[in-house]
Image: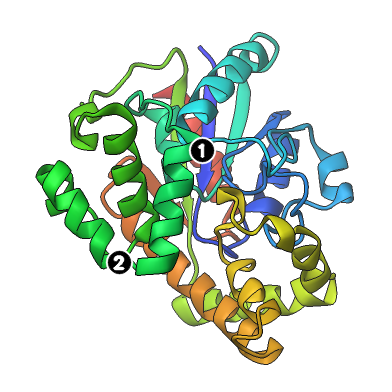
Amino acid sequence: MGKLIVLLGPTGVGKTELSLRLAGHFSAPIVSADSRQIYREIPIGTAAPSSEELGAAEHFLIGARSIHQPYSASLYEQEALALLEQLFSSHEYVILSGGSMMYIDAVCHGIDDMPDVDPEVRDMVYRRYEEEGLEPILAQLRELDPVYYDRVDKQNYKRVLHGLEVCLSTGRPFSSYHTGQRRERPFEIIKIGLNRPREDLYERINLRVEQMFASGLDQEARAVYPYRQLNALNTVGYKELFAYFDGAIDLGEAKRQIQRNSRIYARKQLTWWQRDAEIRWFAPSELDEIINYVEGSCLS
């Protein structure tokens, strides 16, 4: 049976570097579990591996899609599982590395099949959100799906809007599609979590944002600015720069907001993973301990 090493952790913790070292030790290809690195137009703002890093190990699902192609965790599950079946035919180990919580859960446990959203409905819901704000959206969601309304994070507008999109597109409550059924996988899963002291992590995040700007993040964001309504660009690094381009804030404030929002996202990632008892946590410097843990898990 193949062994899937799942390398996860908050943004900026050092997953890319460690994944390369593990790939070298285990002769393993690397499959990305990053919901934004899959888009080829935005490598800087998503901290995609450099050409040198990509050349150091075999990588998959990085730069594989365009921002103009709709994508979802459900599609990722299908593509990643088909890819893993192929890779395990010639490799004992494969590394799944990334920080997108839903993508990792999709591969490890499966996610509920969700219906496609009518593009016209999506455009209508987003236009309404931009014109009227979130409160009317929440009110309609409460009417159409009180179960999902009660449990959704009402500060996360993307989840609120998606719930309403599904209700309007299908005529059924979004919550009716949630079964929570865990699927069996034909490979062994070993979850490795990376973390650092909070101050160290935040310093790395702030420095990485500075490096992104030095590498041309603002030019990259300017190139995709005409498509700012796309869901692929509804993410940290681009939203803030789009506000700068719109004249709402200055460039210094955009940079500060990117750093702050990246730190907030890192906290959300860690909170999400706290509920997963299958994760064994390490510092990124503990390469030998991680290798011993992986190899010991495979013997047990």
Above or below residue 33? Residue 202 is: below
- Find residue 139 and name its label: none
Disc 2 or 1, which lies upstream in sequence?
Answer: 1
Which color scheme does this rendered protein use? rainbow
| Label 2 sits on residue | 155
Above or below residue 199? Residue 193 is: above
Across and down, in percent, residue 158 comes to 40, 54
Across and down, in percent, residue 222 comes to 78, 67
Q: Looking at the picture, tell me which residue is in the foreground, 144 or 175.
A: 144
Image point 76% across, 54% down: which residue?
A: 43
Above or below residue 223? Residue 141 is: above
Q: Looking at the picture, tell me which residue is in the foreground, 272 or 286.
A: 272
Image point 68% across, 52% down: which residue?
A: 16
| 300 horizontally vs 226: left or right | left
Characterize the local packing of mark 1: few (<14), some (14-19) or many (20 or more) Cα atoms within 10 angstroms: many
- The amino acid type found where label 1 is placed reads Val
| Label 1 sits on residue | 6
| 255 horizontally vs 104: left or right | right
Q: Which image quadrant: the C terminus?
A: top left
- What secondary structure is found at the residue carrying circle 2? loop
